[in-house]
Amino acid sequence: MTAVEPVGGAVPGTLRISARTVEKLAACLAHEAAYVPLGQVSVRLADAGGALTVAVTLPVTVGGGVTGSIEERSSVLRRHVITGMRDLGGRTVRSVDVRYAGVRRISGRRVR
């Protein structure tokens, strides 16, 4: 018996990613970029003409060697979510709205 090699490396079949999985991916990406526990990140997704809008709510992290203004860190978070959703989830994100609710204080220096 011989195996049939897929043309161009593609494997026949379908892939379905649930809405909850896409939401969880966005939350994990925000968690990575903002240095907050995943349980403190809230994400809402909405359709924007075939693309997604992502609304992220999380505490702002202070201390522990975290640097940059809130504006700079928000920009990094937006870029991380947009590129991660594209690269990992195959989704186009039109915008990421960041809302800070509360403060997460870190004592000492964080190790990265």
Image (cartoon, grey):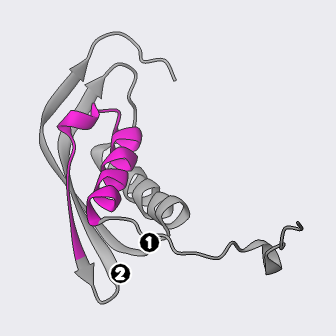
| Residue at x 26%, y 58% (from the top left corner) | 20
Mark 1 lies on a secondary structure that is loop
Q: Amino acid at mark 1?
A: Arg
Of residues 10 and 38, which is closer to you in this image?
A: 10
Furthest residue in direction bottom, as rendered? 49
Position of 78 with respect to 87 (left or right) is: left
Q: How many marks?
A: 2
The residue at the point 38 percent across, 28 percent down is 66
Residue at position x 55%, y 62% in the image: 87
Q: Which residue is mark 1?
A: 91
Say whether residue 92 is magenta: no
Kindly give the residue lying farthest to the left in the view shown: 102
Q: Residue 58: horizontal and vertical position, in percent?
A: 19, 43
Q: Residue at x 39, y 65 (%)?
A: 17
Was residue 23 drawn as part of the magenta stretch in this picture?
yes
- Assess disc 1: are there few (<14), some (14-19) or many (≥20) residues with their C-alpha within 10 Å of its C-alpha: some
Q: Tell me the quadrant of the picture where the N terminus can be found.
A: bottom right
* Badge 2 element: strand
Q: In which quarter of the view is residue 26 placed?
A: bottom left
For the residues labelled 1 and 2, the Cα–Cα distance comes to: 7 Å
- Stretch of the chain drawn in magenta: 19-46
- Give whichever of 88, 84 is nearer the camera: 88
Question: Residue 72 in the image: x percent, y percent?
Answer: 38, 49
- Amino acid type at circle 2 is Ala
